[in-house]
Amino acid sequence: MIDILARALLFPLLYAQAQGVRADVVTLHEPPGPRGGREGRGRDELRLLVVGDSSAAGVGAHHQDQALARPLARQLARRLGRPVRWTLLAQTGLTSEATLAFLKDQKVPRADVAVWWWSASMTSPTRCRWPRR
């Protein structure tokens, strides 16, 4: 009960702060580079699918070579001694719920290994979405 009262009393201040933060937030772009490919040599190919939000998409990296999916595929190919066919399906701002809709619009390949990757980001707080209980 106290938390509801506190939210109601602090709402004008919190709303003003949120608008200031939203205005000051720098939008980072997803890096250039392939969103799929093959790493390693040989035949018995492992199929890797990476799905997620901005962190999976590589925001903050200069190129997909420095992001998540391609380096992961390289390391898997090196350690397993077999080629890895990798696909990245990720987009900045996706919540786990929005990802399901996003995937329905994509050609999702078959995968032997799928990595679902989301960061703790500003997506939910700036949209004023509270966790469901």
Image (spheres, rainbow, N blue to C red):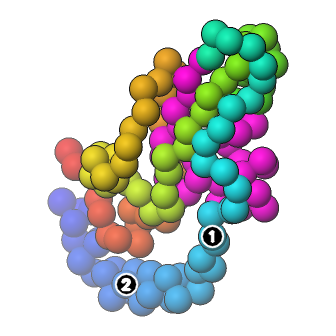
Residue 107 x %, y %: 38, 43
* Crowd class of label 2 (few under 14; some 14 to 19; many from 20; radius 10 Å): few
Question: Horizontal placement of 28 versus 105: left or right?
Answer: right
Q: CA distance from mark 2 to mark 1?
A: 26 Å
Picture residue at 59% right of the left edge, 86% below the top: 24
Picture residue at 78% right of the left edge, 47% below the top: 65
User: Disc 2 marks which amino acid?
Assistant: Tyr
Q: Secondary structure at mark 2?
A: helix
In-front residue for pair 30/6: 30
Say which residue label 2 marks: 15
| Residue range corresponding to the magenta coloring | 46-71
User: Disc 1 marks which amino acid?
Assistant: His
Picture residue at 68% right of the left edge, 32% below the top: 38
In-front residue for pair 71/14: 71
Q: Which mark is residue 29?
A: 1
* 14 relative to 32, above or below: below
